[in-house]
Image (cartoon, coloured by chain):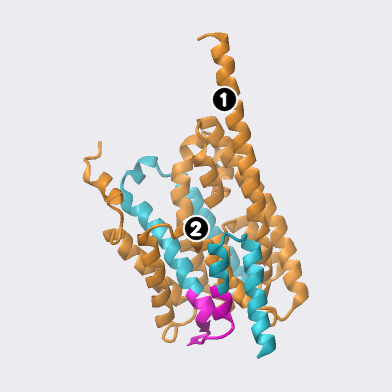
């Protein structure tokens, strides 16, 4: 290999690194903005500022956090087990993300613990979108840390605002919670299968609401995903094909 | 249960799933059903939460100011308006309808 070839590769790699850092910070800033709505909604649901911040620090997964406070807001403390179950099920996808990101994170107990902690939609998406092993690592870490810092700061800010304004229904915060879930769901409705699952799950949840204690309708609706996913109803042909091939 | 117990138990459960992912070999994903169910699980839970947050009032199903607010939010997301702006707009719509009625 010639030295000019090396410096060309270096330049390409440097460019990859720069792009990874840039998209990580951009995604971090965008995500941090809605930490404000989580903080405000959490306090509106009856959690203290400390409890709200604890969730952003330890749970650190937007969908699960919104779910837990959403169920508590409608069902109160009595719906605690359902709130925990809902948040946990929504967190299952983070486990799948971890399986995908773990190969490029590398070894080391502390490094892997920290990586797992910041494994969320955003860090996984930016990481996997990069072209090389090194830029994947950079994209993952920059996004994960940018979102972690931003999300926790804006959660505190939102909790303080929510605490200050008091009566939340007057300000339409209950509708804001529903709108937040629409925003989390929207980017996932790109194919027929998720759209069908979303519509069925919403109908099921609304239908069983009068007969089940608050919190449970959401869990019952999750069965729709298990059924449709297991049998791959409404799936694309491409989703089925690899399973038909013998795995080596 | 107290709120602290709910918050701590939920947080530890979600964090534990993240750790578990790092202990599983990547070959597990060569079977597609688990990954597909995990993706659809997210979709189903979010959709169910929208239904319950928009229509639920304890165990009753009611149509009130939240419904138009959520419809406005859906249109704004479709128009690619930023998250925080849409959430604020939904709150303003619901608050406005309540103030007028």
Q: Earlier in the sequence, mark 2 or mark 1?
A: 1
**Which residue: 34% across, 63% down?**
A226
Element assignment for label 2:
helix
Residue B53 visible from this viewpoint: yes
Percent of width and height locating residue A80: 53, 74
Q: What stretch is highlighted in magenta?
A: B51-71
Which color was chain B given? cyan
**Chain letter, orange:** A
**Which residue: 74% across, 78% down?**
A166
- The answer to whether A128 is drawn above or below residue B95 in the figure is above
- In the picture, residue B73 is in which quadrant? bottom right
Percent of width and height locating residue A48: 70, 71
In this rendering, the count of numbered labels is 2
Decide if residue A128 is on the left or right side of residue B90: left
Residues beneath discs 2 and 1 located on the same chain: yes
Residue A205: in magenta span? no
Q: Name the residue under label 1.
A: A12
Decide if residue A242 is on the left or right side of residue A104: left
Residue B65: in magenta span? yes
Q: Which chain letter goes with mark 1?
A: A
Which image quadrant: the C terminus of chain A? top left
Residue A46 visible from this viewpoint: no
Q: Mark 2 points at which residue?
A: A187
């Amino acid at each position: 290999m010639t030295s000019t070839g090396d410096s060309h590769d270096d330049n390409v790699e440097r460019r990859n690194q720069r792009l990874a850092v840039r998209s990580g910070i951009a995604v971090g800033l965008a995500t941090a903005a809605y930490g404000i709505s989580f903080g405000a909604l959490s306090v509106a649901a009856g959690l203290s500022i400390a409890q709200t911040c604890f969730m952003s620090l330890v749970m650190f997964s937007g969908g699960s956090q919104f779910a837990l406070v959403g169920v508590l807001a409608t069902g109160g403390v009595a719906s605690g087990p359902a709130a925990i179950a809902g948040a946990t099920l929504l967190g299952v996808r983070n486990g799948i993300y971890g399986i995908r990101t773990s190969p490029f994170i590398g070894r080391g107990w502390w490094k892997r613990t920290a990586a797992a902690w910041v494994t969320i939609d955003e860090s996984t998406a930016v990481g996997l979108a990069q072209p090389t092993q090194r830029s994947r690592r950079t994209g993952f870490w920059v996004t994960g840390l940018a979102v972690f810092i931003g999300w926790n700061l804006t959660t505190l800010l939102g909790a303080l605002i929510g605490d200050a304004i008091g009566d939340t229904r007057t300000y339409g915060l209950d509708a804001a919670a529903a709108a937040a879930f629409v925003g989390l769901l929207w980017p996932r409705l790109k194919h027929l299968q998720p759209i069908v699952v979303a519509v069925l799950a919403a109908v099921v949840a609304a239908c069983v609401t009068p007969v089940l204690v608050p919190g449970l309708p959401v869990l019952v609706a999750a069965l729709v995903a298990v059924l449709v996913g297991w049998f791959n109803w409404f799936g694309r042909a491409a989703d089925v094909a690899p399973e038909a091939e013998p795995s080596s | 249960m107290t709120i602290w117990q709910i918050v701590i138990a939920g947080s530890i459960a979600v964090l534990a799933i993240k750790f578990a992912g790092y202990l599983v070999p990547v070959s597990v994903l060569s079977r597609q059903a688990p990954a597909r169910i995990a993706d659809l699980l997210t979709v189903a839970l979010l959709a169910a939460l929208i239904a319950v947050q928009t229509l639920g009032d304890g165990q009753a199903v009611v149509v009130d100011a939240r419904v138009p607010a959520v419809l406005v939010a859906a249109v704004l997301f479709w128009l690619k308006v930023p998250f925080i702006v849409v959430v604020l707009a939904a709150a303003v719509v619901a608050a406005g309808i309540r103030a007028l009625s």
